[in-house]
Amino acid sequence: MSKSSGAVLMTDGPIGKHILAFAFPLFWGNLFQQLYNTADSLIVGNFLGNNALAAVSSSGNLIFLMVGLFQGISIGAGVVIAKYYGAREHEKLKKAIHTTISFGLLCVAALTALGLIAAPIILKLMGTPPEVLPDSLVYFRIYFAGSAGFVMYNCFTGILQSVGDSRHPLYFLIISSLTNITLDLLFIAVLGFGVGAAAFATILSQLLSASLCLRQLMRSPEEIKVRLSQIRPDKLIIFQILKNGLPAGLQNSIISVANVFVQSNINRFGSLAVAGCGSYSKIEGFAFIPVTCFAMALTTFISQNLGAKQYERAKKGAVFGVLCGISISELIGICLYFIIPKLLFAFGSTADAVAFGITQARTVALFYFLMAFSHCMAGIMRGCGHAAVPMVVMLVCWCIIRVSYISIIVRFIPSINVVFWAYPLTWTLSSVVFLVYFLKSDWVHGLE
């Protein structure tokens, strides 16, 4: 494999070095992605005010609800590709790559239609404040009109990362992030456009990054090279993608449904709560970065090693990745606990709005290690083909129990703190379940 291709086999050599070398570019890539997501809120909050900031913030959970299913399916495609790559089955590898792209194009059409039609219904069901609803609807509809950018970007980066290339997606994401921030400033700060311009800047930058990823795949070595003439679905590969990806997609959607329910409860406390908590969620996104990186690195590492029948190596890599993920996440949580007021005021929010964000941060930040453990374990399970396990665990803990807790307790204690405590409580439950499963089941050798 040529060095310029970026693809890496993780089936031999130092375990820690492979995982860190894969996770490090992912970290910087996710950092820049979070930066351009946060740039929307920073620029909107400072130039357009609290209601516009609340509109962008309230759309976040709903957007993830709509795209979560398709992101999960992309993860499933990555598992299939990584196993064929680790096993060096090049013909099946090519079929899997081209099938993934064709499936992604079908997802674009479905997601665009669904997003445009369902937006007003879901925003109203969420109890979005009336003064925020018009801007939320504009932002949401423009964002989903350009769904091709983020769907295909996730599709292409999933392919690159499944063959061990986390370097090129990083380069393209940096370019995309800088483009998004520049367009945000141009459209809003200079030209004075509204919140719709922030969504438009985002979709343009995502289309750019997707185009760069496709270009890289078309110039890759023969075994992973994309040829437009070969983009067609293969029934067997689609079945494997759905088998591995549908549970992950449903897991994302389940979490999103619960988060939308949480957001609807936050909305009841008014636009200041929406703005303050929305600003905190953007900051919290940075704390999730190491979790995302190590979960994705673990999925790829374990998939490749199981494809090569390196079972003990996969198990050692799982332990190493989990320890790294939870250690870094908790360190970030401790830092965030103390510096959160200064970060929140950067969004241009009023003191009353910032107070809501501070309360949320100081309720959940010290429990980040539990959230990290659950996500890393989910990445491990997906990598070894047990994608249904994290789906069930998170369905029960992060959806049913979280929603039930809020529904019942808020009736007796009508405080926003009750809503905030839903996260650490359900992170604790899922972590206990994953730990018991990890210790009691021989999950790697079971695939032998």
Image: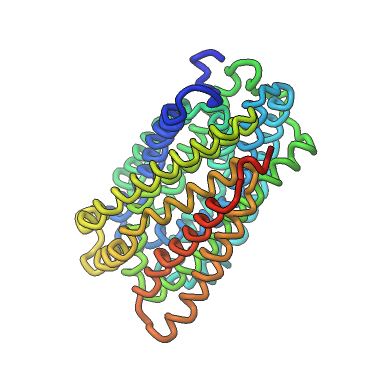
The residue most toward the top is 2
Residue 263 place in picture, x, y as percent = 44, 67
Q: Is residue 254 above or below residue 202?
A: below
Report the front residue among 382 and 4: 382
Q: Is residue 343 left or right of residue 267?
A: left
- For the point 75% across and 32% down, the residue is 232
Residue 329 place in picture, x, y as percent = 35, 48
Residue 27 place in picture, x, y as percent = 39, 37
The residue most toward the bottom is 412
| Quadrant into which the N terminus falls | top right
Q: Is residue 337 above or below residue 264?
A: above
Q: Is residue 63 visible?
A: no
Q: Is residue 112 above or below residue 410?
A: above
Report the front residue among 68 and 287: 287
- For the point 42% across and 69% down, the residue is 422
Q: Is residue 206 visible?
A: yes
The residue most toward the right is 235
Report the front residue among 175 and 185: 175
